[in-house]
Each structure stands twice: as structure tokens, then as C-alpha cells.
Image (spheres, rainbow, N blue to C red):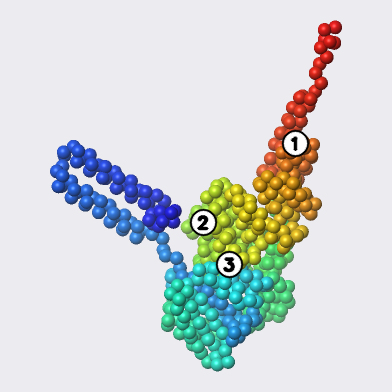
């Protein structure tokens, strides 16, 4: 119903209600005219019809002028097979890499090309070896066009499936070293690219092999292999590997407020990237890497400069929007975004399988709505959509379970966390989440068992609070006081709300103890008083 109202309102809040209000006021005015004999009935009828038609026509004109643009048609390019076999080796990604480079800033507004390396990261290295996972993920993204290809004995074959019209188009060429012929045929049939004078040469196989190592997290292997290469592509990839290694290092943000903490990997990355900036080359990946490092170092002024340049050079890059979301809302207004939720929605629009952006968006929507049922339900929809693309993702499953628990559906959350507990039997967070589910279901014995397990595994701080509340609920006040005090000792700062709840719990328990003490205190001996 809400989507229908939004559609009729041309995505303007209250649009359709405003129309109905105006129609009501105009017709009510004519009704008064009719009963006042100020106008003849014949003329009144004509004026009523004219006024209503004019209002509707004006609203229709405004609706067409203000309606949001139609959604882009997503095009997903899958890796190439060897006949009917699939091997996720560099050769499989040659054609997809060519299309990726051609499509950047070179597609009409109606098309949105999903980049193969984004899909690779969504599937993770564990699932990329099965071609069925690639197809399933593409279908779950509601792709309009699916581009598949294969190296055959007779040459190279490309199949384009129009999933909306259920049509299939096939293109072939004899040569397997380049892709000029099939790309020209694709352009002629679909007009995928604005500038048809593109470079269709096959990419550097050695670089592609190294890039796959990078996507798999083998950053040291990337650096070792590219040690002797100093071309532009190799330098950027080496810098990207250094940035990832630098991000893996823990950071004391409190210390950073007073002391400049150096990150050796970031310094190495900058030495490779700064020359590109000095040469004024339009290299979005360079700007993204520099912006990402600036965010980690909390240098948000530099981060804004680099990321906004990347935004201009590559406006359909989901990673750019995700990193922009770490800036304050005031820094986003000049590019048309009002807050963090707004820019994260854009990141997820371009890449629905972007795990980090999906997690942050679902959580941010929940927090922005102050935990209302409406905001939590929207967060649930976002998480559920991602799990259709990547069903096994533990991080999003855990988030979904937490959101179910917050919408008073602990039984749904329980099923998720039980499965996660089987997969990660030593994760204290899973035991804590199971405890919360049982606590909401009033199963205190099962809740206590799981909270105690979380405490035993890693002194899980919030489990102390729940254990105290269970003991308080069952009247075991000494134990409740002990665990409330333990949670206060573990507070992380003045804004630690669970520590504040524990302080309140201490006061409550002490008050109960005092009342019990008074209740069971011996009465005064009246005989002694009389004497």
C-alpha cells in the first residue's frame, strides 16, 4: 500500500493526499455556492467539471515532471567457461574484465553494469568455484540481462539472456585472443555503450592472476609477485595490497587523538600512489585508496577531497558511496545526499551484494528509526535480500537474527543463532545472542546457560548484565548484585548504556535488600518498654 501511495505521489511526501485535499476544498466550495443560489445549477455543473479536470491535469503534469527516474536495467557479466566446464582461473575473467573497463563512465542511463569483481567478493573464495553460485547470485539481484560466455574449440561464444522478455541472443567469433567481433555485435544489438570506439584488447593475464590473489586476501603473495613490476597497473595493485595490510592492523583511536600513529603499510602505499596525483591522472582506484587511508587515520578533510574526486570520475562505484558514508552529513550535501542512510542506499543500489554496505545500511536504518517496528522491518528486508544473493553469510545472518529479536520474533532469531552456534561453536557472541532469544521467550534456565558460556569463552561484557537481570527476576539478589557490579567494572565509557543499566540495577537490588531487611527485622519487645 505504501509503495502505491509513493508511486501516486511521484515520490513526493504527501503528494496524493494534497491532491485529495485540494479536490475536497474545491468541491466543498462549489457545494456552498449551490446552496446559496449565487450561481445557476447549469453553470455550476460546468464549473465543477472544469475545475476538477484542470486540477487533475495540473497534478498529472506535476507527476510526470517530478516522478523519479525509472530503475536502471542491471547487466551482469559472468566469468567464461571452458566449454561446459568452469575453472575460476585468470582466463575465465578476461572477457568480464574487458567489459568492466569499457563500461565505466561509458553506458547510457538505462544500463547498469555489475562488475565481476564485486560479485567475486560477494561469493567469497569458498563459493566462486561453482558456476551455479554465480548464476544464482545474478538472478537474485534481479538482473535484466545476463551475459555468459565460453571458450569453445571453434572459437569464443557469448550468450545474452534477456530475463524480462525471456529471449536469448548468441554471438560467436573464431578468434579467442581478443573480443572485438563479439563486442561489436553486442553493441549493434543492445547499444550498451555510449562510445563504441572502445579498447577491446584482452587484459594482462599476469596482472589478472595477481588481482585474483588480491581478491582472495593473499596480499603478501601479490606484493612478492609484483616486486619487479613498475608499470602503472602493478603499482596501483601493490598499493591496494599495502592498504589492505594496513587496515588489518589494530588501531587505538583514543591514542590517535594525542599522538600521530604511523602505519608503515599506509606510508608504502602513499609512495606508490602520490605520483599518480601529481601527474593529474583520472584514476578512481587511486583516489579511493587514498580516501580509505584518510578515513582510517580520521583525516576527514583529505578523505572528502579524494572520495569526491572518485565520485566524479566513477559515479557508479558502490565502494565510493560506502566510504563517503563515513563523512559527516554536512560534507555530503554538495553532492546531493542528506545523511549516511541516503548515501549507503546508493551503495547498495549499485551493488546489492556488498556485504559491508548492506550491514551498515540495515543497522543504520534501525538506529535512525530509534528501533521502531517500521525501521526494523526495513532493515530486515535489506538483510533478507542480501541473503538471497549470498545465503551463507554469517555476518548478515547474525544481523537478521538480532533484528528479528528486536521485532518480538525471538523464535525466528533462535533458529538462526542455533545454526550459527553449530557453525561457530567457540564464538561468544553467538552464545550471547542465543541467551537473548531465550530471555525474551522467558526461558531463564536456557538463557542463563548460554550467557554463562559466553562469559566463560571471552568474558562477554553484556552477558553479565543479562545474568544479573535473570538472578534479579528470580529473587537471587546476592548473585544479581555481583553480576551488575561486574558489568559496571567492564564499562567502555560514559555513554555505555548497558553499564548505566547495570548501575540502575545495583540501586534496584540494594533497595529490595533494604526492604527485605526491614520486613524481616525482629519487632521491639513491648514488655521491656513498659518496665
Q: Residue 518 occupies which quadrant of the picture?
A: top right
- Please tell me whether residue 180 is drawn above or below residue 249 in the rendered image: below
Q: In the rendered image, which quarter contains the C terminus? A: top right
Image point (62%, 66%), residue name:
391
The Cα–Cα distance between marks 3 and 2, rounded to whole angstroms, is: 22 Å
Query: Which class describes the residues within 10 Å of circle 1: few (<14), some (14-19), or many (20+)?
Result: few
Q: Is 323 on the left or on the right of 26, as rendered?
A: right
Between disc 3 and disc 2, the foreground one is: 3
For the question of whether residue 122 can be seen, the reply is yes
Which of 489/48 is in front?
48
For label 1, the SS is loop
Q: Residue 191 occupies which quadrant of the picture?
A: bottom left
Q: Is 201 on the left or on the right of 411, as rendered?
A: left
Instruction: Tell me which label, 1 or 3, sits earlier in the chain.
Output: 3
Residue 127 locus on image (x, y percent): 65, 72
Which of 265/72 is in front?
72
Which mark, by number, is residue 342? Answer: 2
For label 2, the SS is helix
Image point (66%, 47%), residue name:
441
The Cα–Cα distance between marks 1 and 2, rounded to whole angstroms, is: 47 Å
Image point (51%, 76%), residue name:
146
Which mark, by number, is residue 149? Answer: none
Total marks in image = 3
* Residue highlighted by disc 1: 475
Amino acid at each position: 500500500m505504501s509503495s502505491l501511495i509513493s508511486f501516486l505521489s511521484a515520490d513526493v511526501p504527501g503528494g496524493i493526499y494534497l491532491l485529495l485535499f485540494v479536490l475536497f476544498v474545491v468541491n466543498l466550495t462549489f457545494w456552498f455556492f449551490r446552496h446559496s443560489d449565487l450561481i445557476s445549477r447549469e453553470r455550476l455543473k460546468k464549473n465543477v467539471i472544469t475545475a476538477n479536470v484542470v486540477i487533475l491535469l495540473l497534478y498529472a503534469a506535476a507527476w510526470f515532471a517530478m516522478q523519479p527516474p525509472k530503475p536502471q536495467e542491471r547487466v551482469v557479466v559472468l566469468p567464461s567457461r571452458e566449454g561446459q566446464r568452469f575453472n575460476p582461473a585468470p582466463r575465465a575473467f578476461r572477457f568480464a574484465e574487458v567489459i568492466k573497463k569499457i563500461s565505466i563512465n561509458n553506458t547510457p542511463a538505462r544500463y547498469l553494469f555489475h562488475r565481476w569483481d564485486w560479485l567475486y567478493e560477494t561469493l567469497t573464495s569458498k563459493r566462486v568455484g561453482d558456476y551455479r553460485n554465480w548464476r544464482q547470485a545474478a538472478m537474485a539481484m534481479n538482473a535484466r540481462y545476463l551475459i555468459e560466455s565460453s571458450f569453445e574449440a571453434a572459437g569464443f561464444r557469448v550468450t545474452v539472456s534477456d530475463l524480462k522478455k525471456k529471449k536469448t541472443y548468441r554471438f560467436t567469433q573464431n578468434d579467442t585472443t581478443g573480443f572485438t567481433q563479439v563486442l561489436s555485435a553486442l553493441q549493434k544489438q543492445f547499444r550498451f555503450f555510449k562510445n563504441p570506439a572502445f579498447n577491446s584488447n584482452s587484459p594482462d593475464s599476469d596482472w589478472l592472476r595477481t588481482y585474483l590473489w588480491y581478491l582472495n586476501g593473499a596480499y603478501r603473495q601479490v606484493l612478492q609477485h609484483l616486486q619487479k613490476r613498475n608499470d602503472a597497473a602493478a603499482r596501483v595493485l601493490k598499493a591496494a595490497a599495502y592498504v589492505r595490510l594496513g587496515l588489518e592492523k589494530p588501531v587505538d583511536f583514543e591514542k590517535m587523538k594525542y599522538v600521530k600513529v604511523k602505519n608503515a603499510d599506509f606510508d608504502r602505499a602513499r609512495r606508490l600512489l602520490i605520483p599518480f596525483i601529481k601527474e593529474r591522472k583520472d584514476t578512481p582506484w587511486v583516489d579511493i585508496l587514498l580516501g580509505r587511508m584518510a578515513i582510517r587515520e580520521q583525516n576527514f578533510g583529505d578523505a572528502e577531497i579524494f572520495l569526491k574526486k572518485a565520485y566524479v570520475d566513477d559515479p557508479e562505484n558502490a565502494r565510493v558511496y560506502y566510504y563517503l558514508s563515513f563523512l559527516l552529513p554536512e560534507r555530503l550535501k554538495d553532492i546531493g545526499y542528506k545523511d549516511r542512510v541516503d548515501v549507503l542506499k546508493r551503495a547498495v543500489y549499485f551493488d546489492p551484494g556488498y556485504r559491508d554496505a548492506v550491514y551498515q545500511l540495515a543497522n543504520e536504518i534501525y538506529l535512525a528509526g530509534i528501533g521502531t517496528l517500521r525501521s526494523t522491518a526495513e532493515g530486515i528486508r535489506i538483510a533478507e535480500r542480501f541473503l538471497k544473493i549470498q545465503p551463507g553469510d554469517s555476518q548478515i545472518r547474525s544481523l537478521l537474527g538480532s533484528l528479528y529479536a528486536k521485532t518480538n520474533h525471538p523464535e525466528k532469531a533462535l533458529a538462526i543463532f542455533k545454526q550459527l552456534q553449530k557453525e561457530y561453536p567457540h564464538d561468544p557472541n553467538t552464545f550471547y545472542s542465543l541467551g537473548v532469544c531465550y530471555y525474551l521467550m522467558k526461558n531463564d534456565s536456557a538463557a542463563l546457560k548460554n550467557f554463562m558460556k559466553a562469559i566463560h569463552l571471552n568474558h562477554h561484557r553484556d552477558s553479565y548484565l543479562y545474568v544479573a537481570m535473570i538472578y534479579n527476576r528470580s529473587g537471587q539478589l546476592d548473585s544479581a548484585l555481583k553480576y551488575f557490579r561486574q558489568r559496571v567494572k567492564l564499562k567502555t565509557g560514559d555513554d555505555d548504556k548497558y553499564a548505566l543499566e547495570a548501575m540502575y540495577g545495583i540501586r534496584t537490588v540494594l533497595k529490595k535488600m533494604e526492604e527485605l531487611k526491614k520486613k524481616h527485622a525482629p519487632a521491639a519487645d513491648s514488655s521491656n518498654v513498659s518496665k
